Image (spheres, coloured by chain):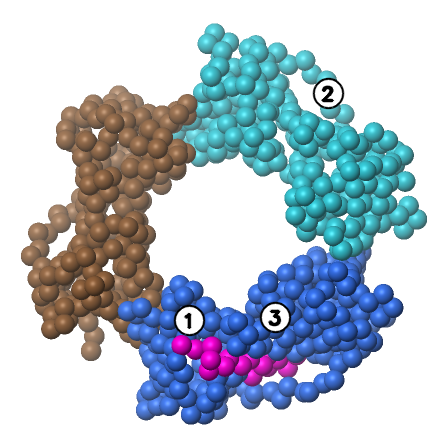
Chain colours: A brown, B cyan, C blue
């Protein structure tokens, strides 16, 4: 059983964070809210999303799992204005999701969850550095790195307590340095890891410009990016595996 | 003889409604205003446009017919701001149309009207249902239908006095329902017809979002879409042939 | 030695006027300001740009020459908001240009100036007609000409003191006439020359809409287009060779 009402903007924010990595996913309809975990086909980027029942206008579920085509569901959510309410109701028999927005009824065929890639276990890493930065700043560094390379280095300079987004191209280099005055918070620690820029660009697309993003970082370790949406009632964690640094 | 002055925006609105169906057309320069009738190459969609002499700043004509390339004329009309006046004057000898907008003179070679597809007779159908709806609502229904299919069904539910824009895809369905509170007017009657979505999308492009569109509908009959522009001094009627409904 | 600070918008305006013609150029770092001269590969269009030291927040140079990739430098300047300050500093040893904008450091590899096409000598022509016109008007004429032809004729009618932007297509013609009331200034003289529209369109892209553009013109002679930017502290002169007029 699943029956819920949610604002179009909250639904879109939730879907966006997953669709940057995968085309289809399993959605767990828990009693206390939705949750989605997914990993991209190359096993490099993961997302872990939860949306509390309190983020909905109304929410009833009893623990089922459905498989959805994200692009389809995003198109439908896009038919509403930000504040419009989206009514969702699962028809258990036909395995279809009935969606209503302001006079518009859409019947979405669900995907057999067993045909969808298995949900990843997101490792509980204890990463030594933690940086809290505005989404806009992250975007600026990623855009700059993209001018010279398809890899990006994230690094903390412990001595001067700065966070660096760096990229080394064939001829040109970029170093975007953020000091204590540019960051919301910095917990310095040994942190220096290289990542594929394509993945980070995709994740960055889903991160709102005004979100506070918590970046957890180590030395040649995965990075975790965490932010909230829906006034704190939705949480997204991205995890991205590192690339080997060549010297 | 033809000599007229009209605002760039009125000229553009008139041309847009025809250019969504055909590339070139005959324009009848009647004494009391312009008129255009055209049918697309597949004989599926028709347009009947009239623009009264009163919609012009000044208008003189004596019943001639000219053939015009619509894209060209739209480009020229696009050189003016909405309120700019476009001066049109036919040179009978060279068969060219002289167009002036604010210092810019354009000499447009006309097309031999005999080389243009014949104007269609638009049948005077007595369709049992009539719905008056805002252009924006029609657009919403067409956009939703386009997510799942390349056909669209227009239907009136006589019992509850609702108008439905429906589409049936391979896996997903759409039903956009408008009741009395969503419609400007509804005259219920037996009405249920299937149409090619491509044509309706094209016609929809020309319909202003705030226009009151009168939809005339029957059972497996053509649909007529009627709206006004130029403060009621311009009238457009689209007619679209139905597709056979497969069960 | 070169070390300077300049607003992102001034840097962008300067680069834009050169990048419409060439991909890379030599920049002369004179004591009293920057200067760039460049000619397109076909030797048809030239640009002569100077940006006074006073247009910079701070400026120190001693006469060197550097070779730059314009697209790269434009991308970097594009990372700043209009008012953001761009710090430029030449590393003579590594032949790299260090660029800083608000926390972002970019190391740009320079190009060997000897590998860049030689700077053109811009002939000191004494052209008989001079027209001063707003950038927007020029843009309007060029856009209209582009509808019918890939050549454009610039002409002064001495008798009535008008400036004409004309184009003759296979079937259609355009004549954009500007009289004394449309022009900022006109010094009439024998002037009638044909140009490649592609080049003029490219130059036009760099000209701000509100710039006062001085057009110097003769009979089958090159045209010179001159305008200022950075509150008069930057000057750009474009020169474009004529095409032979066919009758």
Give the labeled residue for mark 1.
C7
Give the labeled residue for mark 3.
C203
Q: Is residue B124 visible?
A: yes
Estimate the x, y position of residue C64 in percent, counting from the top left: 44, 91
- Residue at the far top: name it: B159
Circle 2: is it few (<14), some (14-19), or many (20+) Cα within 10 Å? few
**What residue lies at 35% left-to-right and 82% top-to-bottom?**
C89
Asked if marks 3 and 1 fall on the same chain, the answer is yes
**What residue lies at 32% left-to-right and 62% top-to-bottom?**
A140
B105 within the magenta span: no
Asked if marks 1 and 2 fall on the same chain, the answer is no
Give the numbered dot on residue B123: 2
**With B152 as the anchor, is C96 left or right in this view?**
left
Circle 3: is it few (<14), some (14-19), or many (20+) Cα within 10 Å? many
Estimate the x, y position of residue C73 in percent, counting from the top left: 42, 74
Chain of the residue displaying label 3: C
C40 within the magenta span: yes
């Amino acid at each position: 059983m699943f029956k819920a009402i949610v604002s179009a903007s909250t639904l879109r924010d939730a879907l966006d964070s997953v669709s940057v990595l995968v085309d289809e996913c399993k959605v767990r309809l828990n009693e206390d809210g939705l949750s989605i975990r997914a990993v991209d086909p190359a096993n490099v980027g993961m997302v872990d999303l939860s949306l509390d029942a309190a983020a909905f206008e109304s929410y009833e579920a009893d623990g089922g799992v459905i498989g959805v085509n994200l692009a389809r569901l995003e198109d439908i959510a896009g038919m509403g204005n930000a504040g419009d309410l989206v009514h969702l109701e699962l028809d258990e028999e036909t395995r279809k999701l009935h969606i209503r927005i302001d006079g518009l009824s859409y019947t979405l065929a669900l995907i057999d969850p067993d045909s969808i890639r298995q949900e990843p276990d997101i490792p509980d890493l204890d990463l030594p550095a933690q940086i809290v930065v505005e989404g806009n700043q992250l975007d600026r560094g990623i855009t700059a790195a993209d001018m010279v390379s398809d890899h990006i280095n994230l690094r903390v300079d412990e001595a001067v307590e700065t966070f660096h987004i760096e990229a080394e191209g064939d001829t040109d280099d970029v170093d975007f340095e953020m000091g204590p005055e540019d960051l919301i918070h910095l917990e310095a620690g040994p942190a220096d890891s290289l990542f594929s820029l394509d993945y980070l660009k995709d994740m960055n697309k889903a991160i709102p410009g005004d979100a506070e993003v918590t970046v957890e970082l180590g030395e040649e370790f995965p990075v975790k990016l965490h932010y909230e949406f829906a006034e704190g009632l939705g949480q997204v964690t991205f995890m991205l595996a590192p690339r080997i640094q060549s010297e």
